Amino acid sequence: MTTRNSDELLSAYDDAPLNRRYWTTYSILTVGISLDYFDFFIVAFLIAVVGPQWHMTYGQSSMILLAGGVGGIVGALVCGSLGDVWGRKTILVGCSFICAVAAGSIALIPDGSVVIFTVLRFIVGFALGGTVTPFNTLLVETTPTRYRTVLSSLGVVFPTVGGVLAGLASATLMGAIGWRGVAALGMAPAVI
């Protein structure tokens, strides 16, 4: 009898329409991940400006850039497991907020603070790794089977949107608001 009830529940779920609630959730998830990846990619444009001003060596700029990637690996491993314990939504929201705070805090660091910059980039990467893991899982879990392949695959496009936004923001705003202003835009995921 339990099997029949489970089958009926799955059937009802798979037959459900993609309603306004689904599209609202999908939109929030995809905008959020785009902004988190904005935070991840913006560092390349910041380094292009800050590196010469701070007289950074190749090793220092590499350390800052690599810190985000290493943080992403650690974050995905740690937060993937924590998502099973605390819930995916909790990890997604928490890590997105941490990503925003760490990325926006880069605007406040003193000139020449390569170590602080590196630590903040590690935190951004860690939080992004923690955000991506439940993001993908939630897309798959909340999408009915008949739409799952298309809509989950489309979710992969949105990190690229974050990279494009980082490039556009840097190209259009760096001269007007400076590198600190562009770094402060990293707080945008906190709004979502």
Image (cartoon, grey):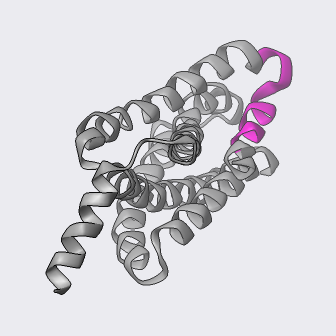
Please identify the dominant SS of the magenta region.
Answer: helix
The residue positioned farthest toward the right in the image shown: 176
In the visual, does 188 lie left or right of 145?
Answer: right
Is 62 a magenta residue?
no
In the visual, does 88 lie left or right of 146?
Answer: right
Residue 101 % position (x, y): 71, 56
**Total numbered labels placed on residues in the image:** 0
Residue 6 % position (x, y): 23, 75
Residue at (45, 35) in percent of width and height: 159
Residue at (61, 67) in percent of width and height: 94
Is 178 a magenta residue?
yes
In the visual, does 90 lie left or right of 16?
Answer: right
Q: Nearer the viewer, residue 164 or 136?
A: 136
Task: Write down the region rendered in magenta.
Answer: 175-186
Residue at (53, 40) in percent of width and height: 23
Residue 45 % position (x, y): 59, 27
Residue 180 % position (x, y): 79, 36
Q: Visible in this render: residue 112?
A: no
Image quarter (top left, top right, bottom left or bottom right) of the N terminus: bottom left
Q: Visible in this render: residue 155?
A: yes
Q: Nearer the viewer, residue 163 or 31?
A: 31
Residue at (63, 50) in percent of width and height: 114
